[in-house]
Image: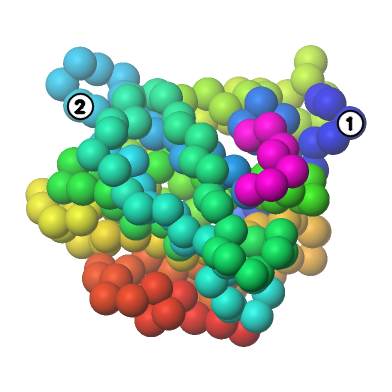
Amino acid sequence: MATMALNVVGAIAGVVGIGMMIPGLIPDKDKHEPIVRIAAGLTSNTEDTTSGNTPGVTLYDIMGRMIGSTEGKADIIKDGAFTDIKVPFNEGVGTKPAEYIAVTDGGNDALCIAYISLTNPDGGKHVWYGDIGKACGHPWYHSMLKTGKIGASEKEGYDYQPACVWIDRDRSNGLPYQGLGIHLYDFEATEERAKMYTDDKDQMCRVAPRYRMASTYPSFFGFLTWY
């Protein structure tokens, strides 16, 4: 495992624990703009697909102030693939690191998200896995996407295949959520945080500043809730 790997919260077999931030999942740093990577899951047969429209992304600073956003697009993130999205800063905000992220489906073609990662211009890196959404009871798919090996070492580790969670603008086919919001720092794991989430899953799933899925997003300010 590369020395840059960091602990992140994952949920494996329904148990919240500490996994590794796998370097290959992280977009390269841009000194001017944050870069967000959104990955679709991978299906195990030709009848299903996790692909969907490229989401819109909105970033917020530590105080919940919007620092940049991009519109969703009809472009498809293909099954098992990812896209990197540069998020330009709003005028006058400087290059503040993003702490909160809102991701909303870019069209009526539902997308199943296996992971979201972000690199700030200052080099700060964050990852969120779809397994969290599965653990919280949100619509998910058993993705076959291998994100890398986690464990004590590369040789002793095992392939991590996080579930993916669904977002869908028109909320068809029984998929009720148009987007999700995450406080990125709440998924940088410590032993204490992993234990807290395991002992009381509501601390992870029902505390809106940490993680929330939303069925509508009339405004991003209503979509996320701040500490």
Quadrant housing residue 213: bottom left
Q: The residue tagged with tag 2: helix, strand or loop?
A: loop
Magenta-colored stretch includes residue 147: no
Q: Is residue 144 visible?
A: no
Identify the magenta region.
27-33
Q: Which residue is mark 1?
A: 3
**Where in the figure is residue 8, as x and y percent of width and height?**
70, 49
Q: Which residue is mark 2?
A: 48
Q: Residue at x 54, y 43 (%)?
A: 86
Quadrant housing residue 79: top left
Q: Is residue 79 left or right of residue 114?
A: left
Give the distance between the C-alpha atoms of the residues marked 1 and 2, in whole angstroms. Answer: 37 Å
Q: Are marks 1 and 2 in contact (CB under 8 Å)?
A: no
**Residue 91, placed above or below residue 133:** below
For the stretch drawn in magenta, the main secondary structure is: loop
- Which residue in the rendered view is the most extreme toward the right? 3
**Residue 28, placed above or below residue 191:** above
**Sooner in the amino-acid sequence: mark 1 or mark 2:** 1
Task: Indicate the quadrant containing the N terminus: top left, top right, bottom left or bottom right.
Answer: top right
**Where in the figure is residue 215, as x and y percent of width and height?**
25, 68
The disc label shown at residue 174, or none: none
Q: Residue at x 38, y 81 (%)?
A: 222
Q: Is residue 31 visible?
A: yes
**Where in the figure is residue 214, as x and y percent of width and height?**
32, 69
Front-lying residue, 99 or 146: 99
User: Foreground mark, 1 or 2?
Assistant: 1
Q: Is residue 138 left or right of residue 57?
A: left
Colour scheme in the image?
rainbow
Q: Is residue 63 left or right of residue 134?
A: right
